[in-house]
Image (cartoon, rainbow, N blue to C red):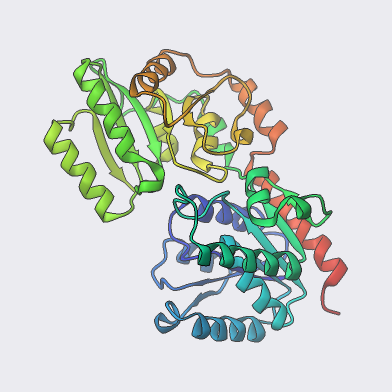
């Protein structure tokens, strides 16, 4: 089968990481994955091409122009003679799916990775609500299969009525748990190990307002006031304005010992094992891979109740809090989490299998949906 994945730039991010799990784990299933992107130097380009996929660069001119973009995307789909188009672009997937239908692509997958768009904290404008309605109609009418990472995401993008249809599936996000299970008891050394009484609380996320790093700096300020030797490890890159604000706060309040900004890293597993707790106070999430990774190390997590609890391993590893809770409540939860032992390895393994959080399970489920839809509608 020949599949076109439309998923933004394919730089580092939870959604992109999840898609690459699919590519890696289904490489022997006679499937070719092609990708579109406006970024010719996308982080995953080299790996995509190494697996035999085409990395199709979209023109810079089409980026801000819906008509030019639509024409270019239509030509790519038509020329590529794809069996499946798999769209991962939230409501924008409606346009992608419609173009795939026009191009004669028989199998059209819409994949919901979040239950909110933008901040949405004060509601959406009338024009944005109209856009949501139109795109939802296009998705539900022209997609042949709908996939969501959680029930919250499915309800948000497809609506409750579509969720009851056989074409709609909940497929949880996943991680390559082999890395975490095989190194479960490994003792790490080197930079950022806990020493001199310091404990690490790690956050792995894009640095942006959505992920709420400024809130975590407020916690850090209180930790310093109370002389608690607990430091945050911020792993990820992101928006320059947010990073500049974090730098300003660190300098103004002398928090260099309490906040470490590590940027994009390839040693996430090692950093998780070097930490005593994981924190995720995001304003919203879909099905955060980083929280699955953290639990796969047996680590205790503190999370905002702004996303589906389906991500919880259900083995008493997660403390759910509200963003309106006082900072002291978050500090109490952090202090409790860093004092607790990691979960037994076997208990973690059983939870991963029970909930399907392993990337091999994820890839098998998606590929089965590909094959099922292709057998039903594929080209003769």
187 versus 66 height, above or below? above
Q: Nearer the viewer, residue 20 or 223?
A: 223
The quarter of the picture where the N terminus appears is: bottom right
Q: Is residue 192 visible?
A: no
The image position of residue 186, as x and y in percent, is: 45, 26
Q: Is residue 364 visible?
A: yes
Image quadrant of residue 77?
bottom right
- Left or right, 92 with reference to 271: right
145 versus 248 height, above or below? below
The image position of residue 154, as x and y in percent, is: 67, 50
Q: Residue at x 48, y 14 (%)?
A: 341
The image position of residue 31, as x and y in percent, is: 69, 66
The image position of residue 285, as x and y in percent, is: 51, 44
Image quadrant of residue 224?
top left
The quarter of the picture where the C terminus appears is: bottom right
262 versus 136 height, above or below? above
- Left or right, 269 with reference to 257: right
Q: Residue at x 13, y 31 (%)?
A: 254
Residue occupying the far front of the picture:
126
């Amino acid at each position: 089968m020949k599949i076109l994945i439309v998923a933004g730039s394919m730089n580092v991010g939870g959604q992109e990481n999840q898609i690459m799990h699919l590519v890696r784990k289904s490489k022997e299933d006679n499937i070719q994955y092609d990708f579109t992107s406006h970024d010719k130097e996308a982080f995953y380009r080299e790996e995509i091409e190494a697996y035999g996929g085409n990395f199709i660069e979209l023109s810079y001119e089409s980026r801000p122009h819906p008509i030019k973009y639509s024409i270019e995307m239509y030509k790519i789909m038509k020329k590529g003679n794809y069996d499946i188009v798999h769209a991962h672009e939230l409501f924008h997937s409606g346009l992608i799916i419609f173009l795939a239908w026009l191009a004669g692509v028989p199998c059209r997958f819409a994949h919901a990775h979040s239950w909110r768009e933008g901040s949405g904290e004060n509601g959406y404008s009338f024009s944005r609500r109209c856009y949501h309605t139109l795109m939802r109609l296009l998705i539900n009418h022209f997609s042949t299969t709908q996939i969501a990472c959680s029930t919250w995401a499915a309800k948000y993008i497809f609506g409750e009525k579509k969720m009851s249809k056989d074409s709609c599936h909940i497929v949880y996000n996943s991680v390559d748990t082999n890395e975490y299970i095989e190194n479960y008891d490994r003792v790490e050394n080197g930079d950022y190990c806990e020493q001199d009484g310091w404990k690490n609380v790690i956050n792995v996320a894009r640095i942006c307002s959505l992920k709420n790093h400024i809130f975590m700096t407020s916690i850090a300020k209180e930790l310093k006031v109370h002389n608690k030797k607990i430091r945050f490890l911020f792993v990820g890159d992101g928006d320059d304005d947010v990073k500049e604000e974090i730098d300003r706060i660190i300098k103004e309040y002398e928090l260099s010992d309490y906040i470490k900004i590590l940027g994009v890293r390839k040693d996430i597993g090692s950093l998780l094992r070097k930490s005593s707790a994981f924190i995720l106070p995001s304003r919203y999430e879909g099905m955060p891979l980083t929280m699955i990774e953290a639990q796969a190390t047996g680590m205790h997590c503190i999370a905002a109740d702004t996303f589906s609890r389906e991500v919880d391993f259900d083995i008493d590893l997660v403390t759910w809090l509200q963003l309106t809770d006082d900072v002291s409540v978050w500090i109490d939860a952090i202090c409790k989490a860093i004092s607790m032992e990691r979960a037994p390895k076997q208990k973690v393994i059983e939870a991963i299998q029970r909930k399907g959080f392993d990337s091999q399970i994820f890839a098998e489920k998606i590929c089965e949906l590909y094959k099922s839809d292709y057998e039903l509608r594929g080209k003769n």
